[in-house]
Image (spheres, rainbow, N blue to C red):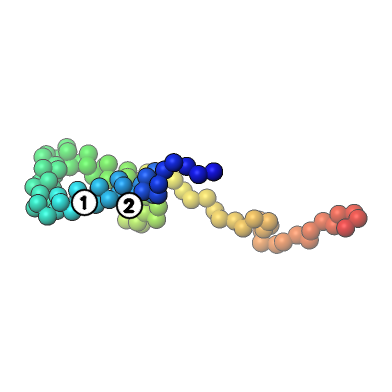
Amino acid sequence: MKSGHSKSHIQGEGDYDSAKKYNEHARAFVQAGKVEQAAKAAAPHNAREQEDMLKAEAEGRSHAKGRSHAAADQGTPGRQKPAKQAPGKHPQGRNPDPEKLPGR
């Protein structure tokens, strides 16, 4: 079954048109020399803003895959990873003998 969309209109993680537009705009922004100005405007204006930004950053990092140990040492919230266990393995490391079914 064919769809009426060409490859350039694929949505989701493969939205090529949007990625191209983003890259063009980001390149133009950098070339216009607006990066330092935007960074200064985004900087915290007081101690409370700085604290809020640091908390938000720590929260975001706690959700990141492969987060650093430094974030864990600072007591940031996060989920513990479940213990990995191969399917069909016995919890104590022994593999029990498979049951023989009659007629096989």
Which residue position holds label 1? 24
For residue 99, the mark is none
Measured from the top left, where is residue 91 in percent x and y?
Answer: 66, 56
x and y percentages locating residue 51 in the rendered image:
20, 41
Amino acid carrying label 2: it is Ala
Name the residue located 17 percent from the left edge and 37 percent from the top edge: 48
Residue linked to disc 2: 71
Q: Residues within 10 Å of mark 1 (few under 14, many from 20)?
A: few
Identify the secondary structure beneath mark 1: helix
Residue 102 screen position, x and y as percent: 90, 54
Residue lying at 79% horizontally and 58% vertically, measured from the top left: 98
Residues 2 and 43: in front is 2
Q: CA distance from mark 1 to mark 2?
A: 34 Å
Residue at image position (23%, 44%) is 54
Q: Hey, what amino acid is under mark 1?
A: Glu
Q: Residue at x 27, y 45 (%)?
A: 57
Horizontal arrangement in the rendering, residue 60 relative to residue 35 (left or right): right
Task: Look at the numbered disc 2 and give the secondary structure of its residue.
Answer: helix
Q: Is residue 74 left or right of residue 79?
A: left
- Quadrant where the N terminus sits is top right
6 sits to left or right of 38: right
Query: Left of 101 or right of it: where is 43?
Result: left
